[in-house]
Amino acid sequence: GGLSTTATTTTTTSIPSEMIEAGRALVSALAILAAAAPSGAFTGQGLANVLWACAAVSVAPHLAAPLVTRVLLSSTSAGRASAAAAAGVKPHQIAKPSPDDVAAAIEAADRLGIVA
């Protein structure tokens, strides 16, 4: 036998506005939860993923801004020490985000119009 290929067609359908708003409400609630969670509760990747979801559905920037701050602060040893002191935990309990997580957070902030 040989290899066979199958052509696929992609159809574009519009998403009802009610579904878009429901998605935005869900991601907004997740952003609020992540911002209220104690430092260290979310990994850098987890925060970057929440921020990317915020950018994807255009949540209100004020909901995502605390997450951007948290990612950026946790990317430095001084920021992790400060977050640990505020949370009453050891600095090593605050996860250091990877460079890719920091880049994703910055890109999400840019898409949302969040500026320092």
Image (tube, rainbow, N blue to C red):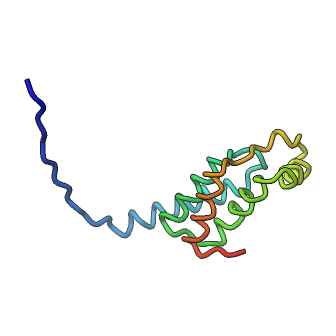
Instruction: Tell me if residue 75 comes above or below residue 115 in the rendering.
Output: above
Residue, far top: 1
Left/right placement of residue 7 relative to residue 34 reads: left
**Residue at the location (77% across, 53% down)?**
74
| x then y, percent, for residue 96 | 74, 46
Q: Quadrant of the C terminus?
A: bottom right
Left/right placement of residue 61 relative to residue 4 reads: right
Nearer to the camera, 41 or 108: 108
| x then y, percent, for residue 61 | 62, 72
Q: Quadrant of residue 89?
A: top right
Left/right placement of residue 4 relative to residue 116 reads: left
Count of marks, rendered view:
0
**Residue at the location (79% across, 44% down)?**
94
Q: Quadrant of residue 35?
A: bottom right
**Residue at the location (84% across, 50% down)?**
77
| x then y, percent, for residue 33 | 66, 54
Q: Quadrant of the N terminus?
A: top left
Nearer to the camera, 5 or 11: 5
Residue, far front: 2
Q: Quadrant of residue 48?
A: bottom right
Residue, far left: 1
Instruction: Tell me if residue 12 comes above or below residue 4 in the rendering.
Output: below
**Residue at the location (84% across, 55% down)?**
79
Instruction: Tell me if residue 74 comes above or below residue 69 in the rendering.
Output: above
| x then y, percent, for residue 51 | 59, 59
